[in-house]
Image: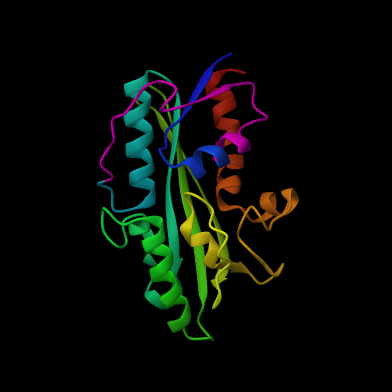
């Protein structure tokens, strides 16, 4: 069975992406599985640039086809912040709890008539020879005034992201499998990418 590297150190992303790819006849491996400890600097100014940087770096490093994603939360009232800085919004050494504490303050301060927000991602699939393909996915919701404080490891922002159309938080503890498929921004992107993965890996 062919291997596909999911190039992320985020436990939440690894679990989610692996689950979304579970219907493909491919062995999903992690950076830990292939003993890669190298970190690549995300120097891009967009989700697209960063996802490509990561996918290409790890595909060449592992000599395996690799997928990597970059994305973030964009809050309309904050001009789209934190965006590409979502992971490092409060500095390189900030923790997920630091982000949660900051978001508690943000959620209280946002105007009631402008709580719109988006989760966006770009996922890139790269081969060791340097070829790369990218797709995007997004979901629209609002920043809730009161967060759902059962934290999802790797996803501190999701406790604040509310989907008014189904009256649920954007959290795996809340969404059914069907709702995950309809609203999950990463699932939408992976679904677009699957035909390319199938074609390029030849199965």
Nearer to the camera, 94 or 34: 94
Tally the numbered discs.
0
In the rendered image, which quarter is residue 77 located in? bottom left
What is the chief secondary structure element of the magenta stretch? loop
Can residue 59 be seen from the camera position used here? yes
114, above or below 148, in the image: below
What percent of the width, then of the height, locates residue 28? 54, 25
Report the front residue among 192 and 22. 22
The residue lying toward the viewer, choosing from 46 and 178, is 178
Quadrant assignment, res 130: top left
Q: Residue 2's x, y, as percent?
A: 55, 16
194 with respect to 71 (left or right): right
The residue depicted at 57 percent of the width and 24 percent of the height is: 199
User: Magenta residues, as a range?
Assistant: 17-42
Compare residues 93 and 158 and report the one nearer the observer.
93
Q: Residue at x 60, y 68 (%)?
A: 162
Q: Quadrant of the N terminus?
A: top right
Is residue 70 inside the magenta stretch?
Answer: no
- Quarter holding the C terminus? top right
**Location of residue 196 by image quarter:** top right
Q: Is residue 90 above or below residue 11?
A: below
Identify the residue at horizontal 25%, vertical 41% (top origin).
Answer: 41
Picture coordinates of residue 97, whole percent (x, y): 41, 60
Which x, y percent locates residue 29? Answer: 50, 24
Residue pictured at 38% horizontal, 47% vertical = 48
Residue 80 visible? The answer is: no
Q: Is residue 28 magenta?
A: yes
Furthest residue toward top: 1
**In the rendered view, how is the structure colored?**
rainbow
């Amino acid at each position: 069975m062919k291997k596909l590297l999911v190039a992320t150190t985020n436990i939440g992303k690894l679990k989610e992406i692996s689950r979304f790819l579970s219907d493909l006849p491919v062995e999903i491996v992690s950076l830990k599985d292939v003993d890669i400890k190298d970190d690549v600097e995300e120097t891009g100014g967009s989700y697209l640039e960063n996802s490509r940087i990561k996918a290409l770096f790890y595909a060449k490093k592992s000599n395996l086809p690799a997928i990597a994603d970059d994305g973030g939360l964009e809050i309309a009232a904050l001009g789209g912040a934190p965006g590409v800085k979502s992971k490092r919004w409060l500095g390189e050494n900030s923790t997920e709890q630091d982000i949660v504490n900051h978001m508690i303050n943000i959620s209280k301060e946002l105007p009631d008539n402008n709580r719109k927000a988006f989760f966006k991602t770009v996922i890139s699939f790269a081969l060791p020879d340097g070829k790369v393909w990218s797709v995007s996915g997004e979901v629209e919701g609002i920043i809730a005034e009161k967060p759902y404080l059962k934290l999802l490891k790797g996803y501190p922002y999701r406790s604040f992201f509310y989907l008014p159309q189904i009256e649920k938080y954007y959290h795996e503890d809340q969404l059914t499998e069907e709702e995950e498929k309809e609203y999950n921004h990463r699932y939408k992107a992976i679904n677009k990418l699957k035909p390319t993965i199938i074609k390029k890996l030849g199965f």
